[in-house]
Image (cartoon, rainbow, N blue to C red):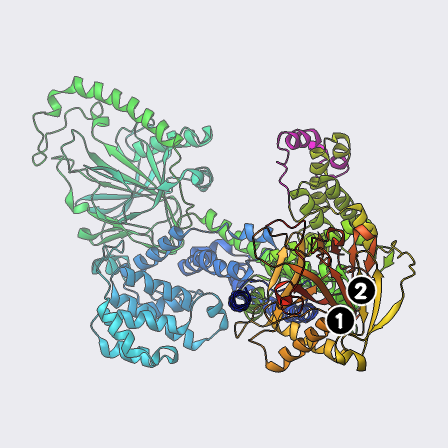
Amino acid sequence: MLHYGLLRSLVHILSLSVVLVACQKNDITESTDYISSVPNRLRLLKQNEKLLLNLYEYIEELQAKIETLRGLAKHLHQPQLAAKGREKEFLSNPMNSLSLIRQMHADWSNVEKVMKQSVGQKQLNFIRKRPKLKNVKESFIAMHRIASSYELNATDIAKGLLDGMQTDAKLSPLECYEMGLLYFNGSLYHKAVEWLETAKALMDKTPSDVYGVLGLTRSKISHLLARCYTALNNLELARLVLQSEPDLNAKAEELLEYFQANKPQKVENDLIEFDSAYAYFCGSSFKPKPTRLLCSYKTSGTPFLRLAPFQMEQISMDPDIFVFHNVISSAEIAILDRETEAFLVPAKVGNSEGEKVTNYRTVNSAWLPHVNVSREVNLLAVRLHKRMSDLSDFNLDSYSDVMQVLKYDFGGHFNIHNDYFNDSSSEDRIATILFYLNDVPSGGGTVFFDLDLKVQPEPGKAVLWYNLNLETFDYEERNIHASCPVKIGSKFAITQWVFEHRQMLNRPCLRPPKLRQYKSRRRWKMLHYRLLRSFVNILSISVLLVACQTENPIKSTDYISSPKNKLKLLEQNEKLLMNLYEYIDRLHEKIETLRKIGKHLQQPQLTAKGQEEEFLSNPMNSLSLIRQMYSDWIHVEKLMDQPVGQKQMDYIRRMNERKPRLENVEEAMVAMHRLKESYWLNASDIAEGLIDELQTDGKLSPLECYEMGLLYFNGSHYGTAIEWLQTAKDLMDKAPSDVYAFLGLTRSNISYLLARSHTALGNLQPARVVLQADPEFSWQVEELLAYFQENKPKGVKNEQLIRFHDTNAYLCSSLYKPKPTRLLCSYKTSPSPFLRLAPFRMEQIWEDPEIFVFHNMVSSSEIATLQRIMEKVMHTKIDDLEDLRYYQFHRTVRQFWMPNPDLPQKENLLVRRIRQRFSDLSDFYISDAYLANMLRYGYGGHYEGHNDFLNDTIPNIDDRIATIVLYLNDMPSGGGTMFPTHQLTVQPEAGKALLWYNLKLDTFDFETRNLHAACPVKIGTKWAMTQWIHEDDQMFTNPCLKPSKNRKY
């Protein structure tokens, strides 16, 4: 069978080589090792230092942000300074109103972006209460109406020049750009060009960084301007615009090609174009023609007029139009202004299809009498109805003929129209009475185009005109009229329409109209029907009035026609500014908070300075550093996460890829669990740095203790969870700090989980005490306890939280003292001739079964070389060499195999020399078929009790005869190799080799008494090299091995 044995050995060598290469090329580990690798932890400490420097740079950026915000605040404060002491006058100017509304909508949004961060949440919530986009669009459309109806150009408007009248308000490039964008979106490209050129000129005239912060750059204007020129087929001008812009010059032709290929589609818009007659009649240049008509007193109609006649002025004779002066007092106007403000809604225009809000009538209105206004106002409405009846000689009913209260703000208008219905209705509006309730500084007049007549509003003035010819009762088309857009201020008025059917008792013999055609009815033949209809109409209007007034049609706040709302807006801007200044104060507080956190996170650097390796060899320091780098910096990132300090934010995001992952934190905590369990430690001692009666300078904070408690809670180890959580609570009470809350931990978090842990164990009274002691939960203790009982954790076991046998704990702890023996040391001088020249120092530490220790097996330089090789291989991510991690719950160690074909020959030769020594000391042959296992244990790294034989029942498969462990460093505490059966522990020392047998040398049966384990490492890192000696290798050195008695194949 010799040829078979040789062939089998060759195949075995080849197969193991293939497996080795495959394993080393496979990426077994994806995360960095921070447990057993000192260089990694040193890098982590250095990384923490860089993050701290980055944090302090961020604080400097934050200070720069405060200066930016101050600049913005100064810019946004301008309306307040300009309006101070004359708010109503200020807001009566359309540019001021437009600027304020746009600023409140758009600029504060940009300020919000600058502010947007977790700090100052109260201020962020407050800043969101702003005008909606609809409000902004309405204000721009209103400005369009002024520009179009008065034929004003963009440059003059931007300078505050309206219809020859210089105002103290101006538009910024921001408003001009938005106007241009409005026209562009409405396919009015000529007007868009005008406004965009104005915006560009203003920005060139007064450049400011503020505009960039608020979202507008010169490039943005040029880009849209070039698009407008392209839409107008003026490519040359579009090219000039792009070429004059440094940011767009290089890609001018590319942009032009894109603009031409993607020309905007023409769309319908709400931008009414006004007739040139508007500019003539509504403009300040219009002067009414002198007439010979005189004023008089109206004393007839009612007896009251004889005592208090109306001042009447006939301003047109054909058709008749009358003006009445002082028809309402200033006190009555004040009541109407005060009481109707809350009920104003966008006015609707009715036609055959119903009523709707249109863009050719822009006014807010309310109806009087109104069921929700005060009795005082409704009584005033009755008096006004009587007054209107007296001055018009028509019958008006206070309940059915409701009057319309009107508020026009800047740009508010009513396009050219007649007041008659012009439909097949049996009645129409005979006349219109319009009461003006205020002066309008500019604009807002009522214009009769066919009569060359304009009536300018004055408080107390009333205008009466007829919509039907009083002789024929046909339509009076010559009284076509319009309400000019309000330029400055607002227009407050009341309109009352006089209807035909109310006059049937007052004027029963009305002539039939010649030109108004009705289907089959004639009013003079249907008096009984009209009386009934009038009664029904009164009832129906009353019902409709109640329904309309109780409905709340307002979906968006009105900032166009409501001075009150604009005053509120100005006040809100003031509050927002105060809010911004408060926010700046919060930023100062944030800087102080970040400094506090920086001081907290700097503690590892200060403690480790000059003794980094010693510092990191302590498991508490390592755990704290790993957890801090994973968890605390996430909270710092959240605190920093804002547009300012983008360089630092990008840096911290890049660092995320190199920071510990969650699995690293869990691994560190499980390692701490192994220390606790294997050395009989309690949580409070560990937190204070006391390990197995050894006081260290490392401590755990409440954060780590809480995370440990959470680990045990999730693993259903509720008793141990309570121990850690109580420690966390005690530490927090001992040294309270705001830093913990910033880092995501409060006393209430601990109390909540602590109470849950007690409840999971069925201990309700301790849980109750914990909750009662916490102010956040004291008012809901019983509810929480009931919830905890109903939702007890499901008892999921965490296999990593293994329990250690008491014997193991004793043998690994500092309590263990080896028993004295009579076994002596000796020199091993055979069988190798080399041993005669350099014998091994051999110590037999156990007699049955035999266990030997060999001293000074490798030199310090060889140890240093091996450690360097191991470090390199376990951290190399190139050339197919990977950081191989052997992590099972019962064995936690990093490993790889040597000799390694991917390593330099010189390094493999060193391992081969050491393996030759193993052969010499063991008297067994060791071939390259069975590689050496290079090991590195971090803190808590261990190997549970086991035997090294394979215990394989497959025939003809060899087993491990013996094991040699070479220690490559001293371990002051922990990390020993212990044999529970022998009550023996061997402590690692650099250069020491340990040899034991896994098979009995006389029978070659399993040597079960050599069950052994690797004690968890308490402090530092354990380096070792393991070599298993196999049966197959001995076929030539020991060819006549006896068959085993107890090994069954």
Question: What's drawn in magenta, residue-wise?
Answer: 770-798
Three-letter code for the amino acid on which mark 1 is drawn: Leu
**Which residue position is annotated with label 2?**
852
**Can residue 71 be seen at all in this image of the molecule?**
no
Q: Can you say which quadrant of the picture contains the N terminus?
A: bottom right
Residue 596 seen by the camera: yes
Q: Are marks 1 and 2 in contact (CB under 8 Å)?
A: yes
Q: Residues within 10 Å of mark 2 (few under 14, many from 20)?
A: many
> Within the magenta stretch, is there residue 948?
no
Using the image, determine if residue 259 lies above or below residue 35: below
Q: Which residue is mark 1?
A: 921
* Residue drawn at the location 22% of the way across and 18% of the way down: 532
Give residue 266's position: percent from left, percent from top: 21, 60
- Tag 2: residue type? Phe
Q: Residue at x 34, y 33 (%)?
A: 387
Q: Which quadrant of the structure image shows residue 492?
A: top left
Q: Is residue 75 left or right of residue 52?
A: left
